[in-house]
Amino acid sequence: MLLTFDRVQKSYPGGRPVLRDVSLTLDRGQTLALTGESGSGKSTLLNLAAALDTVDGGEITLDGTALSQLDDPGRAALRRSALSLVFQQFNLIPSLTVDQNLSFHARLAGCHDPEWSAHLAQRLGLSDLLQRYPENLSGGQQQRVAIGRAMAARPKLLLADEPTGNLDETASATVLDLMLSLVADTGAALLLVTHSAEIAGRLDRRVHLSGGHIA
Amino acid sequence: MTLAVIQALASHWRAHRLQLATLLIGLALATGLWSAVQAINAEARASYERAADQLALGQYDELHNASGAIPLSQYVALRRAGWQVAAVLEGPLRVNGRTLRLLGVDFVAYPALPAVAEVEQSETPPDPADLLTAPGRLLTTPEVQPLLSTQPGLPPVLISNSLPPDLILTDIGVAEVLLDRPGEISRLIILPGQPGSVPPLSEIAPGLQRVAAASQLDTAQLTDSFHLNLSAFGLLSFAVGLFIVHGTVGLAFAQRRGMIRTLRALGVSMRRLVWLIMAELSILAIIGGVLGLVLGFFLAGALLPDVAATLRGLYGAPVSGKITLQPQWALAGLAMALGGTFLASGHALYRLSRMPILSGAGLQAWRSAASGNWLVALAGLAAIAGGVLALLLIGGLVAGFIMVGGLLVGAALVLPYLLSRVLILMQRVAKGPVAQWVWSDMRAQLPGLSLALMALLLALAANIGVGTMVSSFRLTFTGWLDQRLTSEVYVTANDDQQGLRIAEWLAPQVNAVLQIRSVELAHPSGPLFLYGIIDDETYREKWPLIASVDGVWDQVLDGSAVLINEQLARRENLWPGDSLALTQSVTLPIAGVYSDYGNPTGQAIVSMPQLDAIAPGAETRRFGIRMDPDRATEMTQRLRERFDLPPRAVIQQAALKAQSMAVFERTFVVTSALNILTLGVAGFAILTSLLTLWTQRLPQIAPVWALGLTRAELARLELLRSVLLAALTAVFALPLGLALAWTLLAVINVEAFGWRLPMFLFPADWIYLFGLTLLAAAVAAALPAARLLRLPPADLLRVFANER
């Protein structure tokens, strides 16, 4: 098992619970859609899986490592090496070119492969945009760069938070196709948060969160 | 409706209290430093005016004698011939270890003096006869009165508020006794309303020279340059403070673009909004200005004693050491705060007023305003070129200041472009992803920080420039003292007879006894002190000549030429080969020019026989003694004991040098204080920029954190970024500071003080300043970095939240 949530609990700073005894698993190479209403705790669950936040109770295990046992540098190291993230807002680094953004995560992780990066750029249709800055790209192009950045590090787990939420229908379909094909090619597992039943339908499994529980 | 709009606008400051505090502190610092300098200048000028008004200085023509004192017989002859003249005797009076100026005037003949009028109109007026008959009365300020009261043997003291500081006014008869100069007159004042038929001056008193009121050097004129320098520094501090205001107001306006758009959509006209924002800015300017005035008042109070000591030491200018609050000063300070605020906000306000109703609410527009684009850099280059051209084409003190202004403003405008180019280069050569990100992110941050960095550049350049000037001056001054103070011991006898006895006694015991004899001449260019020297190797070997003809010493010592000091040379454009008229009948060619730092008046040197011919009977009270330095202490003691001389009448070279250096160091206390304060303001500008930019940093930092850098690493990088930018700015400040130093030394000093100093470089000082800059930048970035270190992950996660 690549990712395990075991009776995970998380509350907001004011004490209001967001996740209550959530348990789920994700196999290597498997894709999982996480759906739910706004405020149901989808993003919180994703952030916990990404070691961006810590649990209040229970345990999360990623590739055999219990996240609660890691300190801040340990969690940062895990984010660099074992997983990648794609956000709805793209969150590219505005001061770096497309080329530099594409390779940034892989270079941080120490696994930069120029050939693989070039291949990704070509697959994602970014070959002609490499010297541009993010502010000069469309939303769809920016999200393709974000996917390329995530996949360049060959992660075991890709976490995506509403990756098509800011895109129009055409761009959304293109981005999703590219992401799913790359995940399939690299054998990475995917945990994707979405509101869309259609997108959720294209993944291996679907989990619905409601009121902090898995429905 | 207006009230609702005001509430909406004010809500921004409630939500951004730090920004409000920054704005007010920026305004207070700008106004405070400027007002402090203005208060000092105003106080000094008020003192000069008081002195001139109270003593009628420079209002009437005067009669001077080339040999110094005017014989009583000539005064009597003039009066008998119908000349309406008033006698004045002045000199230093030592009271309880403090030297005061005693001015004896003919109370009967002298024009009505306000100090006398004030005393006569007081509740207990003295009998007029008491002022004129023994023991007489001393009029002085309340500050000096306690000093005189404890000294036995002095006449009763009357207090007057109408006198300059450190001055005692009395009848000339009393002054003769106290100064022990019976029958002497320092100068005669030619009173208004002379009878038409008086015989000409050349008939009755041929030795006296008439000096027109207009040609007398007035203290205010003498010290103008000093005050101009202070004002320039104050203006620089003001400008640095305004950078903070400009940055903060610009950001506040950018952050309110969304609110402005909404208000306009709700039906509020742009005209009304602009007026309300201007009113808001005015209120903030007045609050900041008042805070600045309070700061300036205390700062001026702290600095004034040193300025007063400097002005007394350099120019003999009477300045009170206490600051008084004057309404016009406060109003001028508030006007500067208001003017500065609108100057610093004008561009942002204009852009806001032109903002289309459907424009975006982002900060992009604000960021691009300060970016290092080449047009701004070009404007900077034009400003520098303008300054250089002004110096080449116009020349003079004003051109010097235009050059300094052009250099500083131009370099500040060019800085963002230069930094941007360097950062691009560094990003290209950077190897690792983090290093690449750091350089690129620094460049992205540049627009928001560029104003603070400009302020830092100006402060550093001023530090380097003024520091180089002061250190060059110190080095030159020390060398000059070594050359000028060649005698091991200096003696001042009580009178001529004692002087002769001392010289005779010393002659067989020492290597040489050098007479120091001088007279004050009334020269058309102002007071001229003429010294006589005897032929001695000391002069030939050590006198600091900066220009001379061949055989200079032979010509001077055989009486056929004169040496003049640099001040006189530059003021009158007299150089070796020209001639100088010492009296109506004696004109000598100039054989050389010597440096004479710190002396505001003209000076000339001739051979001793020549001096005796020009001014027979000049006192021989002072001597320089050349001897084995190891015996100097013993000889000092023996001289004091044998001739009953007070301690200050026999001074060793080392003590005299120490005194001179102490006066020198005190001269630059104010400059150093303003230097440090300006650097402090620049450091504060960086801090405020970093804090105001803080909210914009999270979206840039959070993705990097998510990709695997810890908050501790990011905090360290934040610190490093600030330090690197400050370091780069410091590197650019070095050539600018040196250019500034050159302008100060080679242009402004020459025009303002009349002497030119060689420029020396002080790399150790630069390294110290560089270290101080890095420290200031690190301290400024420490707070944002500490915030980042302690930032809860939830705050960083908010950046990624979809439902923002």
Image (spheres, helix red, strand yellow):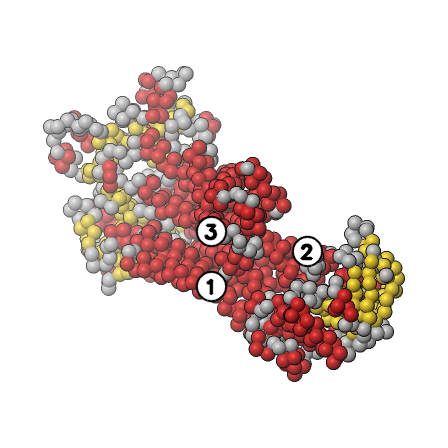
Local packing at callout 3 (Cα closer than 10 Å; few below 14, some 14-19, many 20+) is: few
Judge whether B588 appears above or below B496 on screen.
below
- Spatial CA span between label 1 and label 3: 21 Å
- Exactly how many numbered labels are in the figure? 3
Residue at 68% in and 56% down? B804
Residue, disc 2: B804
Q: Are marks 1 and 2 on the same chain?
A: yes
Q: Are marks 2 and 3 on the same chain?
A: yes
Residue, disc 1: B373
Ranked by sequence position, the earlier of labels 1 and 3 is 3
Callout 2 amino acid: Arg
Label for residue B354?
3
State the image quarter where residue A73 is shown.
bottom right
Ranked by sequence position, the earlier of labels 1 and 2 is 1
- In which quadrant will I find the N terminus of chain A? bottom right
Residue at 22% in and 29% down? B191
- In which quadrant will I find the C terminus of chain A? bottom right
Callout 1 amino acid: Asn
| Residue B261 percent location from the top left of the image | 55, 49
Tell me the chain of label 1: B
Residue at 37% in and 61% down? B382
Local packing at callout 2 (Cα closer than 10 Å; few below 14, some 14-19, many 20+) is: few
Provide the secondary structure element on which disc 2 rests. loop
Callout 3 amino acid: Arg
- Spatial CA span between label 1 and label 2: 33 Å
Q: Return the residue nearer the eye: B198 or B721.
A: B721
| Residue A109 percent location from the top left of the image | 71, 74
Judge whether B555 appears above or below B112 on screen.
below
Q: Return the residue nearer the eye: B421 or B271.
A: B271
- Spatial CA span between label 2 and label 3: 29 Å
| Residue B638 percent location from the top left of the image | 44, 46
Provide the secondary structure element on which disc 3 rests. loop
